[in-house]
Image (spheres, rainbow, N blue to C red):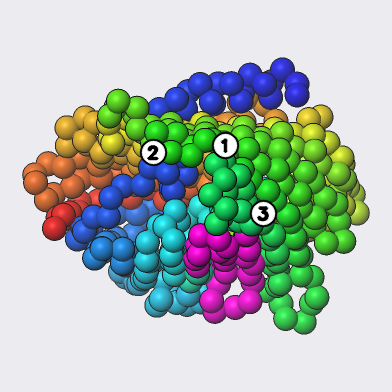
């Protein structure tokens, strides 16, 4: 690993000491909220009056969330903005999710927006979301069932069209033996594919991947869980990769904070990318300018992610993640991965949530960045970035004044290029827990 890679990993991990592991380890308890409000939104310099309704309800393990957002163009006769309602999920975009349980429960399912979907240890799919394009949302589904001796995880990105579909089956051969440590030994097998990357049925461009993994929790009790694991994955008609790693999870330290840590070493052949189905895959699955991948090939001005595999050389890499929570009021997660001697191969994922750490203030932040080559790249928003920030102040018990900022990029069919979409949305909301 070069000096920059090492320093950046150390900075991210040390600064993430307060951070929370993915959505699974330090999730909030289920809560019921009725949120609604109005404000202004600026998209590409055009102002829209915005009405939103985002209630969330939970009854035991059952949960449902809505996200109804109506935009009216202030400079064009107050016309309704149809973008996002005219194709994709259409009116079903109002349903953000319907869920049962959590990822760590024996039975878990979620229909709608997938946030941070993971299969196994994340070597093939990690932090995948089917909502990289905020306007055209998809209705996906995740379903996991753990029968103790065996079980499965599954995910599909779009119930309305055959796109990403896959799953992982796992088996614990010694689960009934009662042998300490070894009874938790787990073997897994994964198969997943994007069966229509370009959304054209006339083409045959499916990209599929399969993998095998083993994991052994060497310590597993209420105080700490530590797991060692190994993964192997193969992208069909392309390369393969291997990884070994260790994870540790301490849910509660003297009632003050919790910690999750993960460190993984990777060995990658030519034509292979770890975490192929990642947080920006919904944008990368189509053709992007070649310089997005750092490729200067006069014969190709644009590349799909599958085509980029032809340029990927053999390398080694590292993945690091450190997370936690403090007093139940700060929840953050940070991870970073980079391949050795590969230009612009850094990938960063950050999340931050804080509620009532400062009285009456609520903060939320998510940020994904690919193509990191230098430290300064982390701080630039471009077509390699997806970000959202929300800061809110509760002026009265149920009245929340907030500012929402979103950045993503979309494919412009008229110009044949990707362009950034920047949204600034001040709003006043009615927010009532019950």
Residue that extends furthest to the left in the rendered view of this protein: 396
For disc 2, the neighbor class at 10 Å (few under 14, some 14 to 19, many from 20) is: few
Quarter of the picture containing the C terminus is: bottom left
Label 1's element? strand
Query: On the image, numbered disc 1 is attached to which residue?
Result: 218
Q: In the image, is residue 231 above or below residue 340?
A: below
Q: Which residue is mark 3?
A: 187
Q: Which residue is mark 2?
A: 222
Residue 80 lies in what quarter of the image? bottom left
Give how far across and how far down residue 58 sits, in percent: 26, 63
Q: Is residue 341 above or below residue 272?
A: above
Write down the region rendered in magenta: 143-171
Residue 320: which quarter of the image? top right
Does residue 265 appear anywhere in the picture?
yes
Q: Specify whether residue 169 is painted magenta.
A: yes
* Residue at the (30%, 25%) spot, across then down: 254
How many angstroms separate mark 1 from mark 3 (CA)? 15 Å
What percent of the width, then of the height, locates residue 217?
A: 56, 41
Along the polypeptide, which appears first: circle 3 or circle 2? 3
Kindly state the secondary structure of the residue where label 2 is placed. loop
Q: Residue at x 76, y 70 (%)?
A: 206
Number of callouts in the render? 3
How far apart marks 3 and 2 lie (CA) works out to 23 Å
Residue 400 placement (x, y as % from top left): 18, 47
Left or right position of 340 against 246: right
79 vs 284, nearest the viewer: 284
Is 32 one of the magenta-colored residues?
no
User: Looking at the magenta stretch, what is its main secondary structure?
Assistant: strand
Q: CA distance from mark 2 to mark 1?
A: 13 Å
């Amino acid at each position: 690993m070069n000096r920059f890679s090492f320093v950046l990993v150390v900075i991210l991990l040390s600064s993430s000491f307060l951070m929370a592991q993915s959505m699974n380890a330090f999730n909030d308890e289920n809560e019921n909220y009725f949120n609604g409000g109005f404000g202004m939104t600026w998209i590409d310099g055009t102002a829209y009056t915005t009405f939103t309704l985002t209630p969330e309800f939970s009854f035991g393990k059952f949960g449902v969330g809505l996200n109804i957002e109506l935009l009216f163009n202030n400079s064009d006769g107050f016309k309704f903005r149809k973008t996002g309602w005219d194709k994709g999920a259409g009116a079903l975009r109002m349903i953000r999710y319907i869920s049962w349980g959590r990822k760590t429960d024996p039975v878990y399912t979620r229909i709608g927006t997938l946030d941070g979907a993971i299969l196994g240890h994340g070597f093939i799919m990690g932090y995948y979301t089917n909502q990289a394009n905020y306007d055209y949302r998809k209705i996906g589904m995740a379903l996991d069932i753990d029968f103790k001796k065996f079980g499965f995880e599954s995910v599909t990105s779009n119930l309305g069209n055959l796109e990403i579909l896959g799953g992982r089956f796992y088996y614990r051969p010694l689960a009934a033996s009662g042998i300490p440590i070894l009874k938790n030994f787990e073997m897994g097998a994964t198969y997943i594919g994007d069966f229509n990357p370009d959304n054209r049925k006339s083409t045959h461009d499916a990209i599929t991947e399969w993998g095998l993994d083993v994991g052994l929790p060497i310590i597993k009790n209420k105080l700490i869980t530590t797991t060692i694991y190994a993964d192997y994955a193969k992208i069909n008609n392309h390369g393969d990769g291997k990884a070994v790693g260790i994870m540790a999870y301490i849910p509660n330290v003297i009632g003050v904070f919790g910690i999750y840590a993960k460190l993984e070493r990777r060995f990658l052949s030519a034509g292979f990318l770890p975490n192929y189905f990642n947080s920006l895959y919904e944008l990368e699955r189509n053709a992007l300018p070649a310089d997005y991948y750092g490729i200067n090939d006069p014969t190709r001005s644009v590349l799909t992610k599958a085509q980029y595999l032809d340029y990927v050389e053999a390398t080694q890499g590292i993945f690091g993640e450190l997370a936690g929570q403090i007093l139940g009021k700060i929840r953050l997660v940070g991870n970073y991965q980079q391949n050795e001697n590969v230009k612009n191969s850094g990938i960063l994922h950050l999340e931050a949530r804080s509620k009532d750490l400062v009285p009456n203030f609520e903060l939320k932040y998510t940020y994904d960045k690919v193509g990191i080559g230098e430290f300064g790249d982390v701080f630039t928003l471009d077509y390699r970035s997806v970000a959202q920030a929300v800061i809110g102040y509760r002026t009265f018990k149920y009245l929340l004044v907030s500012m929402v900022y979103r950045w993503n990029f979309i494919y412009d069919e008229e110009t044949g290029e990707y362009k950034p979409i920047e949204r600034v949305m001040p709003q006043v909301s009615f927010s009532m827990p019950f």
